[in-house]
Amino acid sequence: MPRLYYALDLRDDAAAIAEYENWHRPDVVWPEIVASIRAAGIEDMEIFRSGNRLVMVMQVPDDYDAAGKQAADAADPRVQAWEQLMDRYQQRLPWAKPGEKWVAMRGIFSLKAALAACDARS
């Protein structure tokens, strides 16, 4: 199963960051949001923070349909309400395309690949 990585910034405001983190607590996040994530076939999702930078890691099946997830979210009023709420805290990365929130990250190093290359050279 592939892992997908995305980045996004929060407004650089300690109180807003604390509120954002609170909204993502397991007992606070809206159940409809969790259901929409699972309905898209996403096996696991984690969000990490350093300063005001967020990194989201998603474990997805090989046939994961990102466009289908985006379309389903756009048609779901509860997901749209959540996205509007989260927009209060988020800011787009400077290199994000118009309308893009979470920006896909590109892997640049893999220990497994490096080890395999080292073994092949031996």
Image (cartoon, helix red, strand yellow):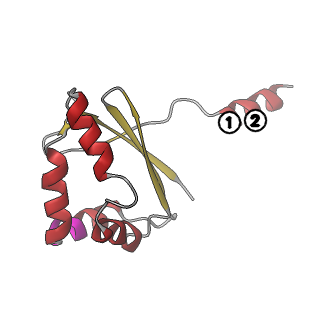
* Residue indicated by mark 1: 113
The tally of labels here is 2
* Element carrying mark 1: helix
Q: In the image, residue 71 lies at what x, y percent?
A: 22, 67
Q: In the rendered image, is residue 60 in sight?
A: no
At label 2, counting other C-alpha atoms closer than 10 Å, the crowd grade (few under 14, some 14-19, many 20 or more) is few
Q: Image quadrant for the N terminus?
A: bottom right
Majority SS type along the magenta span:
helix
Where is residue 88? Give x, y as percent: 13, 43
- Give the camera-side residue of 25 and 38: 25
Does residue 64 appear anywhere in the picture?
yes
Instruction: Please state if 9 lies on the left or on the right of 87 as rendered.
Output: right
Are dots 1 and 2 in contact, CB under 8 Å?
A: yes
The answer to whether residue 72 is magenta is yes
* Residue 31 colored in magenta in the image: no
Location of residue 96 by image quarter = top left
Looking at the rendering, in which quadrant would you find the C terminus? Answer: top right
Instruction: Locate residue 121: give its quadrant.
Output: top right
At a point 51% along the width and 30% down the height, the residue shown is 108
Kindly identify which numbered label has been placed on residue 116. 2
| Magenta span | 71-75
CA gap between label 1 and label 2 equals: 5 Å
